[in-house]
Image (tube, rainbow, N blue to C red):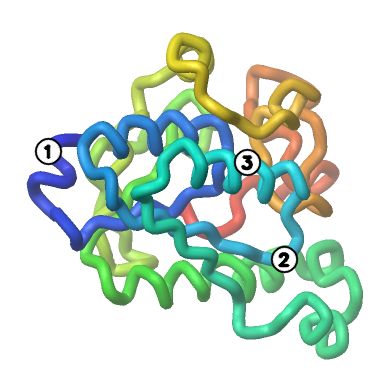
Amino acid sequence: MKWAYGHYGNQLVYACSFGIEGIVLIDLIYKVKKDAVIVFLDTGFHFKETYETIDAVKERYPGLQIIMKTPELTVEEQAKEYGDELWKTAPNSCCEMRKVIPLRETLSGYPAWLSGLRREQSPGRSKTNFLNKDEKFKSIKVCPLIHWTWKDIWRYVTKHDLPYNPLHDQGYPSIGCAPCTSPAFTMDDLRSGRWNGSAKTECGLHE
């Protein structure tokens, strides 16, 4: 973390979903840069517990610059134009409009961004490196937690008494938009509760 901010300084942004890995990364960031920029992709479909977690983080880390990045279309505008359940009928399109495009807009002003990806999270993330050339967003993706295990994450949270999303205590190891997130049916794949019933495993931010 010291290297990342020492190298990129104010040109480094953290795109955070405020899941358990995100909370750990925020705590580590705050030790190095108390006014770091944190971006949350506010799709309009998140659990109320997620917003409550963000409020708790703001209280715990008052110096952070937390930006709530919203899509061009509101939830109501999207429903009017594409139907009430685009997340079900065309999930890739929904993710593109509500996550990928907003993040691309955000990262256009930053050469590098932080991510809480861990190799253990899923087979598709098993080869993630500390530094990754991100072709999709034309930037460098820095992943400090790649070697952390699920136990490491929780050990750190407990040791430092960090606030976290209570849905983690209800069988949700990975938390995204409410319509597309269910409790995981196996801890062998921590993202198995995302887009349950479909072959989709990523929202398009990490490929």
Decide: is 136 above or below 185: below
Q: Residues within 10 Å of mark 1 (few under 14, many from 20)?
A: few
Decide: is 33 above or below 203: above
**Which one is nearer the viewer's eye here, 116 or 44?**
44
Q: CA–CA distance between discs 3 and 1?
A: 28 Å
- Residue pictured at 44% horizontal, 16% vertical: 160
Which secondary structure, mark 1? helix
Q: CA–CA distance between discs 3 and 2?
A: 15 Å
Tell me which amino acid carries mark 1: Trp
Mark 3 / mark 1, whichever is N-terminal: 1
Decide: is 171 above or below 44: above
Q: Name the residue under label 1.
A: 3
Q: Quadrant of residue 8?
A: bottom left
Residue 37 shown left or right of residue 175 in the figure? left
Q: Name the residue under label 2.
A: 44
Tell me which amino acid carries mark 3: Thr
Q: Name the residue under label 3.
A: 53
Q: CA–CA distance between discs 2 and 1?
A: 34 Å
Q: Residues within 10 Å of mark 2 (few under 14, many from 20)?
A: some
Task: Give coordinates of residue 180: x percent, y percent.
Answer: 78, 51
Residue 170 shown left or right of residue 134 in the figure? right
Which secondary structure, mark 2? loop
Decide: is 184 above or below 44: above
Task: Give coordinates of residue 186: x percent, y percent.
Answer: 74, 20
Residue extending farthest left: 7
**Which one is nearer the viewer's eye here, 181 or 92?**
181
- Report the quarter where the N terminus lies: top left
Mark 2 / mark 1, whichever is N-terminal: 1
- Residue pictured at 68% horizontal, 18% vertical: 187
| Label at residue 114 | none
Tell me which amino acid carries mark 2: Gly
- Residue pictured at 32% horizontal, 75% vertical: 108
